[in-house]
Image (cartoon, coloured by chain):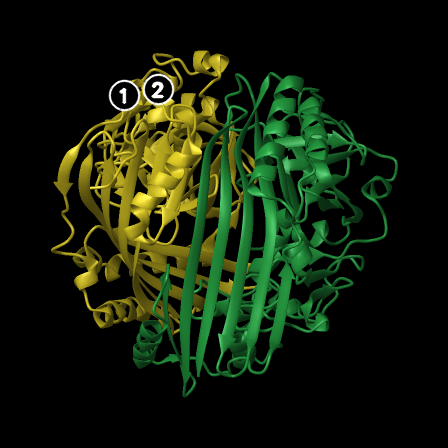
Amino acid sequence: MYNFPDNFYSDVRIERIYHSTIRIEMGRLEEIKESVDLGAFIRLFDGSRWYYSSTTALDSIDKELANLASLAKANKEINNHPVVKRMQRNICKQTIYQENSVEKVNLQDKLKLLESYSKLAINDSEINHWNIVYSDKNLKKNFYSSIGSDIEFDTQIAGVRLAFRFGSGANSFTEMWCKADVCYEKITDLHTECQKRIDQAKDFYKNAETIPGGNYTVVLSPMAAGIFAHESFGHKSEADFMVGDEEMLKEWQLGKRVGSEKLSIVDDGNAFGSGYVPFDDEGTKAAKTVLIENGILRGRLHSSVTASSLNEDVTGNARGMNFEYEPIVRMTCTYIEAGSITKEQLISEIKYGILVDTVKHGSGMSTFTLAPSMAYLIENGQISKPVKFSVITGNVMKTLDQIDGVSDKLELLSFVGGGCGKMEQFPLSVGFGGPFVRVKEINVQ
Amino acid sequence: MREKITEILQQTSLSLGQSEIKAVRRKISKRTGCRVYNDYNIGISGAIGEADEEELYAKAEKNLSYKINYPVEATKNKKVSINLDECNLSDNDLFEAVEKILRKTAERHSNFTVNHKANLNTVELSIENEGQTKLFHRDKFAELGLLLKKRGSSDILDTAFSYVGRNVNSDKIIESVSELITAFDREEQLPGEALPIILHDKELTKIFQKDLNGKLFGNKASLFQEQLGMNVFNEKFSLKIATDPRESFMPIFDSEGTIPEEGLTWLIRDGKIIRPYADKRTAKMYDYENTGCAGGTYDSVPTLTAPHLEIIPGKQSLKSLLNGKNGILIMIAGGGDFTPDGIYASPVQLAYLTDGERLLGRLPHFTVKGSIYDIFGKDFIGLSSDKHFTVGNERLFVTNMEIKAL
């Protein structure tokens, strides 16, 4: 155990990160590597300011703690500070990915797996350019605090990401297929799914037509709904942006209606996948946090600091990108909850609209955007043809209110090779998803 | 042949929240990468923290067994040492400057809070190999990202000030922040007439980062595939790879140790597409010129990476480019994208009306749209000769685009 200085709150987070990456481009092996990083992030709080340090010299942690204490002002009442009182004292060992760690899979086997996927692109003469990446990470964390927390847990993700391009000049189309899971074995036999995406993209490339801009009824796929939930509402649920703003708190009062009664959004670090975070980086146990329930604002995402400021409970959302960064309020796995009608019913009720299937990226302030990759026209309740346009956009709050149908099957998605960005911390692994979600009216550009 | 890459970052980082310094983070991080070249293959390894070089080279040699083809020579007999550490700022200086900015802004604009980060970075990067190459880059600079949020606003930020530089003039920053906030509070209507659009050039040059990629060209997959050597854009439009470390805060050499000749950094000249960008391997594979665009992390195989690009400025100031009109300055346009045929569309979350010298007021949200061939073609007005401190201390790009109220 460490020498936590008296009259301060302090904690130590130690991370051991095994990761490997293999990249093949146009049939050529471009990179294959694996490494183990080991480091610690140290925090100290004196009641008015936080002091942080990160180090890879694990034998210097006590010295780092003492250094941070020398910068701060001793506070005999620190354990009664509202921030410290919100810190959970957890003692637990929850390592579930050591026996089946991706570290135990031979790098040569990973290469063979990637080569088997790359054959799908090699064998398709219409693909002009492609690259494929295998990536995995096994992360073991130990967390100790001056109030007695002693936690050990691990997370894991492994995945394959194929990016491919048809055509050239003005007539080209780029698409991607990415699949990730918590166990290596679960991504070894997805070739049929990958081939299906290639075939779908080829059809889209050959047949997609441009449609005029305007307002359309839009059905969001689980991927699009997940990105929408993450970008448009998830970030607004991160409580750090409303701390110290009384007017904002009135605007975002729990219990207020913020969307259609069909809409429920949650964030849950217990969901296995790329957003699995059983304990956050303050040692708080993951919780299922209901953000919106049937259109009513029910909760928000907290660290100990924001929870204390807003007099609410911690939620397990204080996360640092790695051992070089301090925890800030971040999402884990954010998704829209399933409704009661089938996807087919949802679409059959639309006379003229659009299905957004895959998405390149999204963003959200008070105005959100989704840049679709593959989208389809819906005519008289049927998907009729592939269509292309730049972005869909709208006011977040109006759009939440315009949701008039949610399908009955939830799909949670995991990823490798990207993540969420906030402030300087990018990329952080998150998960998201949802069912198919229908919005009465969204602007298409 | 053996080659070692060393990256060192010494950073003091202040976390800002509700116009106060909430946290102080200090770190020194060291990353070491080792490469071994043998028989036109490359082996790699790397570590964070203090590392045993011999162990790393042994791992890199083991990595050679995967036969990652690297059919070019490592850079030999090149010695360059650049030290831009002319910044006299101490951690305390940064602390005092930021406290002053926060205090004065709070006094002047109690309805806004300042959030996010202020960092003081000392960076070192070196590449050394057995071929007598020794490249060294050191710089020290401050980075301020001030997110300005109006109390009661439902947005995470309402307007923002950013700055990267080797000194911190707190008075000048306070005035700029004040100008941004004052103009934000002055709501204007969308103009009835078409006005020039003013953008930070990087918002739109990302399509050139994507489609002037040598590998895309080599595989006949670029948007500009059939237009190499052709006059495609306005003759006033020229685009170069940014290589001046004073301006870019990046090393003059790429991760293969290439320092491109000035002439090779031009990608578009007087409207004509001259060349795609390339690294050593791409240049050899597709018979292009090596423009010094190898990137990657300290422990990766050097790989073709999109460079920082700069539009060549004209001789006219922003005010002069606007030619007596007001212009629409786009500050935040998040989520926009290009269609495969080069049509750009984006919602604009924050735009100001400006006369080229002052911010006159804030415009409501709207959408913006235009073809890449028009934006840099018939509608291209120019890049300002003057830099604008309030807008990231950057030169600004002026064009015409279609806008629509949201």
Q: Nearer the viewer, mark 2 or mark 1?
A: 1
Q: Quadrant for the C terminus of chain B, please.
A: top right
Instruction: Give the amino acid at mark 2.
Output: Ser
The residue beneath circle 1 is A85
Q: Colour of chain A?
A: yellow
Task: Give the residue at mark 2.
Answer: A308
Chain containing mark 1? A
Count of picture labels? 2
Q: Is residue A359 above or below residue B217?
A: above
Instruction: Supply the letter of whichever chain is green.
Output: B
Q: Which amino acid, by three-letter code, is at mark 1?
A: Lys
Expressed as whole percent of the image width and height from the top left, the position of residue B279 reads 55, 72
Label 1 packing within 10 angstroms: few (<14), some (14-19), many (20+): some
Mark linked to residue B3:
none
Residue A422 on image: x %, y %:
45, 39
SS for dot 2 = helix
- Considering only order in the chain, which callout, 1 or 2, is on the residue closer to the N terminus? 1
Q: Marks 2 and 1, how far apart in space? A: 9 Å
